[in-house]
Image (cartoon, rainbow, N blue to C red):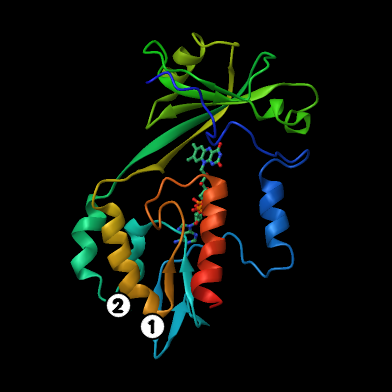
Amino acid sequence: MNHIEECQFVHSSFYYPIKGGSQFLADRLSAGLKIIYNKEIFRITRCESKWLVEGMEFDRVIFSGNIKYLPSLLAGATNLYGFIKSIDELESHGTTSVFCKIDKNPFSWMYLPDKKYDAHRIICTGNFSNSNNSSGIMTGTVEFTDYISKDEILENLSRMPYNPRYIIHNYEKYTYPIQKADTRGMIKELKNILEPLGFYLLGRFAEWEYYNMDVAIGASMDLMNEKILS
Ligand SMILES: Cc1cc2nc3c(=O)[nH]c(=O)nc-3n(C[C@H](O)[C@H](O)[C@H](O)COP(=O)(O)OP(=O)(O)OC[C@H]3O[C@@H](n4cnc5c(N)ncnc54)[C@H](O)[C@@H]3O)c2cc1C
């Protein structure tokens, strides 16, 4: 707005894995850990000083899901009645992500601040690492804020730069938390109640913080060092 050149913006410089994209980092960090994948948690209860997560007993729980589901997940375990209205009122945006073939171009992120496009950006991770492309085919992800139908997607793609061709799309309801003046205070109060019980909120929708991956990982390291290990 004030014509100040980007200096330390999050995308100005970064390291990127040659193979495997950002999943490479997750794989490295999780190496040697016992992780149960593809298991949805519906119920967390309290038994004396322990937490029971779907019947399995734990001393501590680090909750990185969506805080909107916390009151029902913890129903009976602890009383969050005073927070239900504030949690209910938390706002967010969703995203429709469209995976496409796209013409060769030199850009990683293309931002589209133009009313003629409904999409706000195109990400071509194949320009970070060629191994992200399939045998010489350049791909890109076109992002639209909130829900948009397939017909509208196709119409938009036909007008966009570098000729994106539709492969598949996905709509996700919770992608961008909207923080209000009192959000951090409310989350802090909630943490003050849960943490003495060994229950920690961590992550973009658990803390309703606009975390990028590096900051989310940093927050988990801080939690470990400042609260779990100390
Ligand atoms: C469209 C989009 C583009 C982005 N682009 C970038 C980018 O270019 N660079 C960047 O650094 N960051 C980017 N981000 C941000 C990045 O994705 C987040 O910072 C990061 O994923 C946050 O990690 P998290 O662990 O807090 O949450 P998540 O990654 O959302 O992890 C939470 C996990 O909990 C699981 N879960 C929730 N409830 C339950 C339950 N009841 N039972 C079992 N599992 C459950 C979810 O399935 C999910 O896997 C982007 C985000 C979006 C939405």
In this view of the protein, can residue 154 be seen by the observer?
Answer: yes
Residue 71 visible in this rendered orientation of the protein: no
Mark 1 lies within 8 Å of ligand 1 (Cβ measured): no
Query: Is residue 124 rendered to the left or right of residue 134?
Result: left
Question: Can you identify the residue that label 1 sits on?
Answer: 46
Q: What residue is shown at x 39% (from left), y 26% (from top)?
A: 148
Image coordinates for residue 112, horizontal then vertical, percent: 47, 18
Task: Tell which of 23 and 180 is nearer to you.
Answer: 180
Examine the rendered structure and indicate whether residue 58 appears above or below residue 133: below
Q: Nearer the viewer, residue 32 or 53?
A: 32
Instruction: Name the residue beneath numbered marker 2.
Output: 78
Between 65 and 38, the residue placed more toward the observer is: 65
Residue 71 in percent (x, y) is at 30, 66
Q: What element carries label 1?
A: strand
Looking at the rendered image, the quarter that the N terminus falls into is top left
- Please provide percent x and percent y for residue 86: 21, 57
Do the numbered discs 2 and 1 sit on residues whose CB atoms are within 8 Å?
Answer: yes
**Would you call the spot at circle 1 few (<14 residues within 10 Å), some (14-19), or many (20 or more)?**
some
Name which residue lies at 51% across and 26% down. 6
Quarter of the figure with residue 130 = top right
